[in-house]
Image (tube, rainbow, N blue to C red):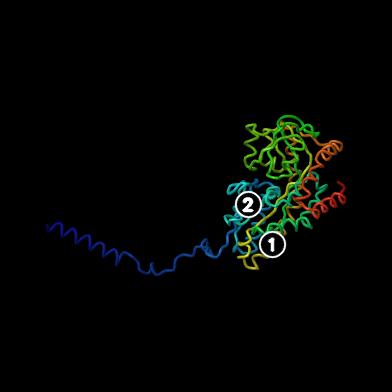
Amino acid sequence: MRTVITITLFIITGIFTALFFGFDLSEASKTLEYDDEQEGIQDRLVIQFSHVVAENTPKGMAARRFASLVESRTDGEIKVQVHSNGTLYNDQQEYQALKEGRVEMIAPATSNLTERFPKWQVLDLPFAFPSHQAVEEAYEGVIGETLLQELEKEGIKGLTFWYNGYKQVTNNSRPIVYPNDFDRLHFRIMPSPVIEAQFEQLGASTSVLPFNKTYRNLEVGFVNGQENTASNIYSKKLYQDQSYMTISNHGYLGYAVLINQEFWDSLSKEHQQIIESSMTETTSWIRRHAIELNDEHTRRLRQQENLQINYLTQAQREAWKRRLTPIYYRVEADVGEKLMMEIYDLQDKYGN
């Protein structure tokens, strides 16, 4: 019994000795070491920016550039987290996510807005824009202003339009140079009534598929082909299971940069101005560099041994335009006379 008591007293004495002599109380009174990663963590504002294309495309590069400008100009008070390649939401999910506030910013292809906002179909009209200057005038003039205003009724603020390039056609069956060459082929398309009507007019069938499922559906042969810009075709390797590509420039693919209105209204005026100025600078950058990047990716596509690339002659181009003209009459009621006249004026001005 004495042994147990002795051992117990020894242990208790050791504990008290450690507490009062072994522990330096002065250490407990010192200020904790400064951790710069925690600085302003409660005040930092994070913008989740979701998009579906690769980082080495015009939109992917512009998104990163915009994020860098905003963080720099706000001294880190705002961080834009860019989620590329559809890692957050695919192109059929992102708009609803924006509306519900699950993400603050998106940059969808303009075609993806046409079912909700019929006037946006004007941007999908085949051969609507004879030149890059015509696209710029449409995006930054009356057409762009009118279309962005359409978004306000759903609590979405349109910041600007971003540029990519003209669309080309790929397929795994045969060269496509005349309208009849589309006959009975099956294409992946974006959810646009005009694009669906375009392929229907050309004698082809279509399936609406998310952008990031296009490669797989080409690979397994569910669809014969697709239309896209050279930058998207190259960066997503959409050419790998395709044998033919037509440089047709039959339509233009661009993006609307959108932000949740409620989130926008919660920002200070200073932060709003910084975002707008950063967006203006980024838009100017992508307007210039999108052309260069698509040209570069076209050159790389020409180096692919498995891909035969055909360029439309003037006669072939005119045949496409004649076959697709009825689409203009089909959408006039949805688009409205004002926007249709703007398109016709651009075609007259830039020589369609």
* Residue labelled with disc 2: 95
* Residue labelled with disc 1: 276
**Total numbered circles:** 2
x, y (%) of residue 240?
Answer: 67, 34
13 with respect to 237 (left or right)? left
Distance between mark 1 and mark 2 Cα atoms: 21 Å
Element under disc 2: helix
Query: At 72% from the left edge and 51% from the top edge, which residue is drawn?
Result: 118
x, y (%) of residue 211?
Answer: 65, 43
Outermost residue to the front: 333
Query: At 66% from the left edge and 62% from the top edge, which residue is drawn?
Result: 275
Q: Is residue 173 above or below residue 235?
A: above
> Looking at the image, do the residues carrying marks 1 and 2 touch, with CB atoms under 8 Å apart?
no
The front one of 25 and 213 is 213
x, y (%) of residue 333?
Answer: 77, 50
The front one of 239 and 36 is 239
Q: Callout 1: few (<14), some (14-19), or many (20+) C-alpha neighbours within 10 Å?
A: some
Query: At 12% from the left edge and 57% from the top edge, which residue is drawn?
Result: 1
Q: Quadrant of residue 227?
A: top right
Element under disc 1: helix
Q: Amino acid at mark 2?
A: Tyr
Q: Amino acid at mark 1?
A: Glu
